[in-house]
Amino acid sequence: MLVISSREFRENQKKYFDLIDSNEQVIVQRGKNKAYVLKPVTDSDVYFAEPEIKLRLEKSIAEAEMGELISVNKEDIKTLLGL
């Protein structure tokens, strides 16, 4: 894990992006009380940022909290998928 200043990051962005791409954790310190973790955006980050997906997840969570669940066993899923 590397902790660098925002100035160091600005001056050497390519270097730190390459390190992040190599699975190195980089934290940018900004002043005394602020720090940021840099990480690549993944497909799941993009997927869960979609408003429609967010609404569907919120609806599903609310239904689960109200006990509105349907139990499905593994064999039923395989049958539905034609496996």
Image (tube, rainbow, N blue to C red):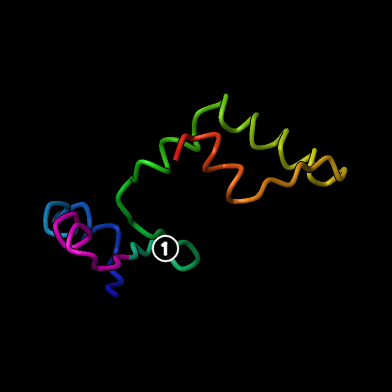
* Residue receiving disc 1: 31
Residue range (magenta): 17-26
- Above-or-below relation of 4 to 69: below
- Above-or-below relation of 41 to 37: above
Q: Residue at x 34, y 45 (%)?
A: 42
Q: Residue at x 47, y 61 (%)?
A: 34
Amino acid type at mark 1: Gly
Q: Quadrant of residue 23?
A: bottom left
Give left or right: position of 19 versus 63: left
Packing grade of label 1 (10 A; few <14, some 14-19, many >=20) is few
Query: Residue 67: x percent and y percent?
Result: 86, 45
Query: Residue 61: x percent and y percent?
Result: 73, 42
SS for callout 1? loop
Q: Nearer the viewer, residue 1 or 45?
A: 45
Give left or right: position of 43 versus 20: right
Give left or right: position of 54 versus 61: left
Q: Quadrant of residue 9?
A: bottom left
Q: Quadrant of the N terminus?
A: bottom left
Q: Quick one: which residue is furthest to the right in this view?
A: 66
